Amino acid sequence: MLERIGVFSTCLADALWKDALAATYRILAHVGFEAVPVSGQTCCGQPAMNNGDFASARAVLDRSRAQCAGQADVVVPSTSCAAMLRHGASLLSVEGGSTQWWELGEFLWKKCRVRSWPALPTPLRVVFHPACHRRMLESDDCHTPLLALVEGLELVKIADEEQCCGFGGSFCATHPTISSGIAQAKLGAIREAGAENVVSTDVGCLAHLEGVDRAGGGGLRFQHFAEVLAACL
């Protein structure tokens, strides 16, 4: 019998990038787990926290974490949501219980000790965009080592690869010109590197970059980190 593990889906993935969630379940099955969605979950509380409504953020976060009571491990296929569920809880003094929260790449690299992965069916050149919230996880880079395991995948370096995509949650709505300008700078560096695909662990980053790219007539392809690994299976 496979070990069961909870998956905390994200609001943006549910609404905009369902393929990332489907890919997450395929990946977890591949490494030996029966993945099940967290029952009754809502938001992680990050939108409220970003806007300074700490009371609402605390209430939402507390409820979402309580839904996972009794589960040893929960995987989150989103850097920003994982950071909120883990680091945000300490900032807001939300009691944690015994659940260990894992961003997907962390779980594969650190918990499962994945050190090999099947090859891609067709070669792919990609730029990996590290979501800014990875810093809140206080975790080493687990994603580029995992991607480097994939035969047929070429990781392309770009200038200022740690630069923000410009999304910033509500920032892109309150400061659209600045937000778009940051995205355009990032996209320019990606095009200069000659990559066809942009990969990230955060749907917010992907949706923002894709929107700015399409508005400018670009033709880049945007994929969640999980989608790339699942394409190998």
Image: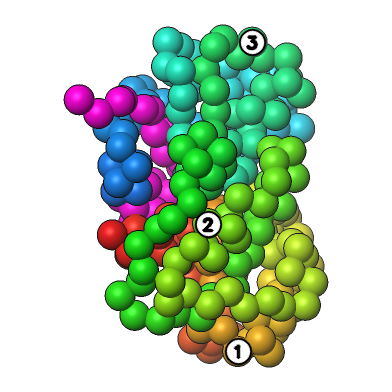
> Cα distance, mark 1 to mark 2?
22 Å
In the rendered view, does 119 fall on the left or right side of 184?
Answer: left
Asked whether residue 52 is drawn in magenta, I would say no
> Where is residue 119 drawn, in percent x and y?
36, 68
Q: Where, quadrant-wise, is the C terminus in this rendering? A: bottom left
> Where is residue 104 drawn, in percent x and y?
49, 43
In this view of the protein, can residue 68 be seen by the observer?
A: yes
Going by the numbered disc 3, the residue's amino acid type is Glu
The residue beneath circle 3 is 95
Residue range (magenta): 1-25
Seen at 43% across and 72% down, the residue is 151
Instruction: Give the number of the mark in front: 2 or 3.
Output: 2
Residue 146 circle label:
2
Seen at 53% across and 44% down, the residue is 109
Seen at 20% across and 25% down, the residue is 1
The residue beneath circle 1 is 194
